[in-house]
Image (tube, rainbow, N blue to C red):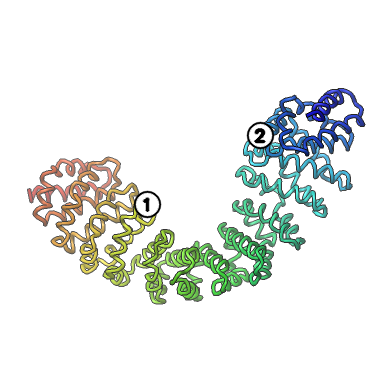
Amino acid sequence: MDNLTEALQKLKLASGDNTAHGVEICLDCLLKALASTKFMRSPCVDAGLIPPLVQLLNSTDQEVLLQTGRALGNICYDSHEGRSAVHLAGGAQIVAEHIKSLYQNTEPENEKLLTVFCGMLMNYSNDNDSLQAQLINMGVIPTLVKLLGIHSHNASLTEMCLIAFGNLAELESSKEQFASTNIAEELVRLFQKQAEHDKKEMIFEVLAPLAENDVIKLQLVEAGLVECLLDVVAQTVDGEREEDIAQLKTASDLMVLLLLGDESMQKLFEGGKGSVFQRVLSWIPSNNHQLQLAGALAIANFARNDGNCIHMVDTGIVQKLLDLLDRHVEEGNVTVQHAALSALRNLAIPVVNKSKMLSAGVADVVLKFLQSEMPPVQFKLLGTLRMLIDTQAEAADQLGTNGKLVERLVEWCEAKDHAGVMGESNRLLSALIRHSKSKEVVRSVIQGGGVKHLVTMATSEHMIMQNEALVALGLIAALDLVAAEKDFVGASLVSVLHKLLSDERSAPEIKYNSMILICALMGSEPLHKEVQSLAFIDVVSKLRAHENKTVSHQASLTEQRLTAQS
């Protein structure tokens, strides 16, 4: 501690006089003490060293500023106490002002000082959201972006700038400021100059958080980042070194991220004729799992509007995805399966695509994954089939009479650990009945034990699921009430309907479909008795005054039916 104590004494005196040489000696002494052990940081704070150090930032002596910046940066490094003391003494504000006044000066000595100051701010704000927010509010981002453009020839300064950007870019509030600068052009220009893996990786670490912002996504696309990424992919796809594999993953992941923005995606799609779109398509038949994954995810992102989906189905993309899935059926790569199914699900949304995709054998390939034990794959498989059969009676009929599928759906309806899988299973079970309107499908669901799950689905917190369940249950009652009677009683369907009609929060369509179902259940003696015992007439008669005309009209009809059969 001797040298530290000595340095403190000298510094406190030195900050009061203006002997630059004396200050430099004591700063040098302090830096050596700090460099020798990390345990020196807290004693520096406790001894009240920070305010006099910050005062030295007002010096006009270049060497004093350099040493002071280093000392403060060292004290802030991985030290909450150090950062807090620098914050209270106003050190960051002074350093930020220095950077603003010096950033245009390209003299070597000045660049050395800027490097130290950028490093100090980096250590000051690292992993600390509130201090990062403070720097953003000081307006350091536009200054640092300009600095990067002017000093891109200086490797050390560029590196410090990039690390500072990486820190600040994680904060959502920074994105708006970054978007108002020419950061995209500067980063792309810098990226194009780099040959070393480490330098590219450093730029990637800034690009990834920035590319989460849709405005910046478009700026990066317009600045030519996509072409850079495609070059990286081409250079590393056959590489076996770890750094090649890492760069390939980073570049292809970033490419997919850029496609999440609607404007950037549409710009790259170019009506399906864009060279970028064509290059990405070529990734799908690749033998590289990372490229297969990125290609499938890119297709899923391009398939975010009907026009793109229709064009892609018409130009044969479905077959590429099916071939890819076929390669991953046995012991396949789960992330590739998930991505390819996501793409097929999105492509199946436009009505005109459904029959084309069914004719191409999509349902048959998707069914090969029924045995998957991976919830993400199960979830996408269910969503894809549900999209495919929407308004497609024949396909719904075929799938609804597939005993293995219905058995698996009933099993997944009980997957309480995976709410998404459970919800999608229920929705597909309902969809098979609603779109086929087939007695055979209804029988298949009853025999498979699916009725109780549809009754539970009618109590869902999601109105759309409640409604889908009620319509399916209404079709079951209309097409085969006798076969379903026992399951309806066992699942307390009548009691569920009473609650739905009594609940003021139930949507008009829920009330309407509940009354339709009540009327259908009157043909069963045990269910009829349950309806009478719960005094449904009281609930229904109140609904005659409902503000929704369809509900009030159905309430009158239901009341007549209940009265006639009481």
Q: Which of the 4 quarters of the picture holds residue 16?
A: top right
**Is residue 226 in sight in this rendering?**
no
Q: Which mark is residue 122?
A: none
- Within 10 Å of disc 2 (Cα), the crowding (few <14, some 14-19, many 20+) is some
**Along the viewing direction, whichever of 381 and 529 lies nearer the viewer:** 381
Q: Position of residue 458 (x, y in %)?
A: 27, 51
Residue, x 89% and y 47% (percent of image)? Answer: 107
Type of amino acid at the residue the image marks with label 2: His
- Within 10 Å of disc 1 (Cα), the crowding (few <14, some 14-19, many 20+) is few
Q: Position of residue 5 (x, y in %)?
A: 80, 26
Q: Which of the 4 quarters of the picture holds residue 256?
A: bottom right
Q: Position of residue 333 (x, y in %)?
A: 49, 67
Left or right position of 549 against 116: left
Earlier-in-chain disc, 2 versus 1: 2
Left or right position of 477 against 309: left
**Along the viewing direction, whichever of 13 and 346 lies nearer the viewer:** 13
Type of amino acid at the residue the image marks with label 1: Asp
In which quadrant will I find the N terminus? top right
**Along the viewing direction, whichever of 422 and 538 lies nearer the viewer:** 422
Residue, x 72% and y 31% (percent of image)? Answer: 86
Residue for badge 2: 80
> What number of labels is visible?
2
Residue, x 80% and y 29% (percent of image)? Answer: 4
Residue for badge 1: 417
Q: Secondary structure at mark 2?
A: helix
Q: Secondary structure at mark 1?
A: loop
Q: Position of residue 272 (x, y in %)?
A: 56, 70
Real-space Cα separation, disc 2 to disc 1, in angstroms: 40 Å
Are circles 2 and 1 on residues that touch, CB within 8 Å? no
Left or right position of 87 against 523: right
